[in-house]
Image (cartoon, helix red, strand yellow):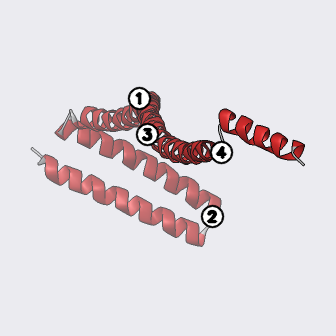
Amino acid sequence: MLNPIRVDAAVDLAYGALIALSIVLIATLDTNIGIAFGVGVFASYVVHVVWKMARFDPDWMTQAVEETVEKQVGETVEQTVGESVEQTVGETVEKQVGETVEQTVGETVEKQVGEVQSQVEQTVEETVEETVGETVKKQVDEVQAKVEAVDERVEQLPQEEEVEEIVEESVEGESKP
């Protein structure tokens, strides 16, 4: 009986010789005839290799197809799902963060503006009260001093009785010639 490994080696050598013959035909004869012969030899060699692989390892083609499909599906799913998830998460995060930041900043600004306004009002009120109080006190003191000065002058002026006496004396003095 023949050894399968030796038969496979002999067949591989025969295909190699046929490919070499097609190269010689291309170089010496008409190019189209050589190419046609070479393509035929190559196609039959591919069929031989597939038959040999199927005989020695029947699952090799199934595994190769599975690996190829798995790789393609994995890349497609990863790319599609990745982009979709990235876009969805990006939009959701952007929306949520935007709303939260806007609300928080708005509340914080309103609170701080209220506090600053309250402090400004209190400071202005205290400053106005102090300034107005000092100014009014100063002016009241000045007016009071003037009133006292006027009172002193009024006291120094002759009283009604004294004026009558002076007038009477003047009238009497003029009537006595």
Q: Mark 3 to mark 1: distance in Å? A: 39 Å
Q: Position of residue 99 (x, y in %)?
A: 46, 27
Q: Which of marks 2 and 3 precedes in the sequence?
A: 2
Q: Position of residue 30 (x, y in %)?
A: 64, 64
The residue under the point 29% across, 32% down is 66
Q: Which of marks 1 and 4 precedes in the sequence?
A: 1
- Give the mark toward the camera: 4 or 1: 4
Q: In the rendered view, would you say 88 is above or below 154?
A: above
Q: In the rendered view, would you say 43 is above or below 114?
A: below
Dot label at residue 157: 4
* Residue at mark 1: 100
Q: Mark 3 to mark 2: distance in Å? A: 111 Å
Q: Which of marks 2 and 1 precedes in the sequence?
A: 2
* Residue at mark 2: 31
Local crowd at mark 3 within 10 Å, few (<14), some, or many (≥20)? few
Q: Residue furthest front?
A: 177
Frontmost residue, 88 versus 138? 138
**Mark 2 secondary-structure assignment:** helix
Q: Which of marks 1 and 3 precedes in the sequence?
A: 1
Amino acid type at image mark 3: Glu
Picture quadrant of residue 80:
top left
Local crowd at mark 4 within 10 Å, few (<14), some, or many (≥20)? few
Amino acid type at image mark 4: Leu
Frontmost residue, 42 versus 168? 168
Mark 3 near mark 1, Cβ–Cβ under 8 Å?
A: no
Q: Is residue 37 left or right of residue 49?
A: right
- Give the mark toward the camera: 1 or 2: 1
Amino acid type at image mark 1: Thr
- Give the mark toward the camera: 3 or 1: 3
**Mark 3 secondary-structure assignment:** helix
**Mark 4 secondary-structure assignment:** loop
Picture quarter with the N terminus: top left
